[in-house]
Amino acid sequence: MVKAAQHPLQLSYRCSLESLLERLDISFRNLHAAGNDAKFVLRALLMLAVRDAERQLNASVLPYWLPTFRAIARAPLPPAKAEHPPPLPAAEATFSH
């Protein structure tokens, strides 16, 4: 994946997934968890397709899918899960007959 970024971004070196995401302006967190890395690699690939299309094609003839790919790649992250759920209110915490 990181090697695939070299041409569209005109890099002479390979960079980490973290630096690639930063360079593509893609929000991320909790890298190096398998599911997260997969999700962010897919977002990076979408953004690389956008960047490559913008670089290679005439601005008046950009593909119809380009704004959709950009929106998916840069979509906001869902809120982080709380470490511990908040305690239940007293009325719900007890069970009565």
Image (cartoon, rainbow, N blue to C red):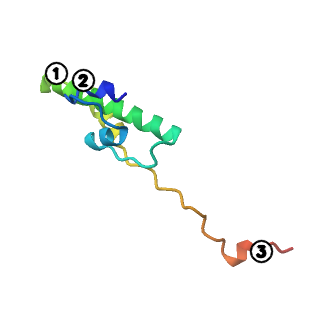
Rounded to the nearest angstrom, the CA distance separating label 1 from label 3 is: 64 Å
Q: Are marks 2 and 1 in contact (CB under 8 Å)?
A: yes
Q: Which residue is mark 1?
A: 57
| Quarter that holds the C terminus | bottom right
Question: What kind of residue is marked 3?
Answer: Thr
Residue beneath the point at 77% across and 74% down: 94
Within-10-Å neighbours for mark 1: few <14, some 14–19, many 20+: few
Residue beneath the point at 42% across and 49% down: 29
Identify the mark nearer the N-term, 1 or 3: 1
Q: Are marks 1 and 3 in contact (CB under 8 Å)?
A: no
Q: Which residue is mark 3?
A: 94
Horizontally, residue 76 falls left or right of residue 58, namely right
**Residue lying furthest bottom:** 90
Residue beneath the point at 23% across and 26% down: 8
Q: Which residue is mark 2?
A: 63
Within-10-Å neighbours for mark 2: few <14, some 14–19, many 20+: few
Dot 1 lies on which element?
loop
Identify the mark nearer the N-term, 3 or 2: 2
